[in-house]
Every structure is written in C-alpha cells, then in structure tokens.
Amino acid sequence: MTQRFTQDEARHLVDELMPHILERIVASPTYWGDRERVHLGRDVSLVNTLFNTVSGHIFISDHAFFGHNVCVLTGTHSIDQYDSARQTAVPEQGRDI
C-alpha cells in the first residue's frame, strides 16, 4: 500500500529531511574509479569533492581542506588518439597525486 501525504504533510517532511540530505551530499565525496586508491590523512575536510582514481592513487595529508566542488583527477586521455579511441586510451597507473 502506498502512503499518501497531504501537500502540507509532504512539505513538512521535505523541510525536515532536506538539511540532512544536503549535509550528506556535501560531506560525502564522489569517487570515479577505485575508492581504495584514495588515502586520506587525519582531520581532512571535504566539501562535495570528486576523486578520479582511474589512473593513479591520491594522497591527502593531515588537516587538508577542500572547498566546494573540488575535483582531484588522476585520469587523462591520450592526445595521440582520436574519436572513440581517445576515450578508451586511459592509463591505469602512473598519475598519482
């Protein structure tokens, strides 16, 4: 059975949940690639951070702070390839940060 809410009940529910949802989104980094390749130090602050680990490991030292929407990208593509080959010619390692 589907729970039905009045418009006021739904608005109240959204008002109650939205700060928690936004905090979760902002505080949780996004990973593109193997998240085991991200090595975070102590007391690191991440604000909606994207980590791309396709081509290497990422090492973040203690007490680092990342502002809004920072992207840390190990991935790259070959400038010697063209068309769809450029999209798949990605090194698996060697671009550590």
Image (tube, rainbow, N blue to C red):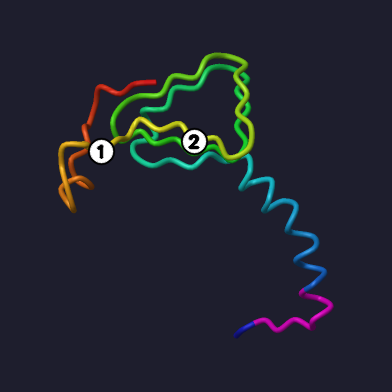
> Would residue 60 appear left or right of 11 to someone viewing this image?
left
The residue that disc 1 covers is 77
Across and down, in percent, residue 2 comes to 62, 83
What residue is drawn where x is 58% and y is 17%? Answer: 42
The N terminus lies in quadrant: bottom right
Across and down, in percent, residue 54 comes to 30, 36
What residue is drawn where x is 44% and y is 35%? Answer: 51
Query: Extreme top residue here?
Result: 62
Closest to the camera, between mark 1 and mark 2, is 1
Instruction: Report crowding for label 1: few under 14, some 14 to 19, many 20 or more residues within 10 A (C-alpha).
Output: some
Give the quarter of the image for residue 17: bottom right
- Secondary-structure class at tag 2: strand
Q: What residue type is labelled 1?
A: His
The C terminus lies in quadrant: top left
Distance between mark 1 and mark 2 Cα atoms: 16 Å
Give the quarter of the image for residue 88: top left
Across and down, in percent, residue 56 comes to 31, 26
- Secondary-structure class at tag 1: loop
Give the magenta range.
3-10
| Camera-side residue of 68 and 31 | 68
Residue 7 falls within the magenta-colored stretch? yes
| Camera-side residue of 42 and 89 | 89
Instruction: Report crowding for label 2: few under 14, some 14 to 19, many 20 or more residues within 10 A (C-alpha).
Output: some
The residue that disc 2 covers is 71
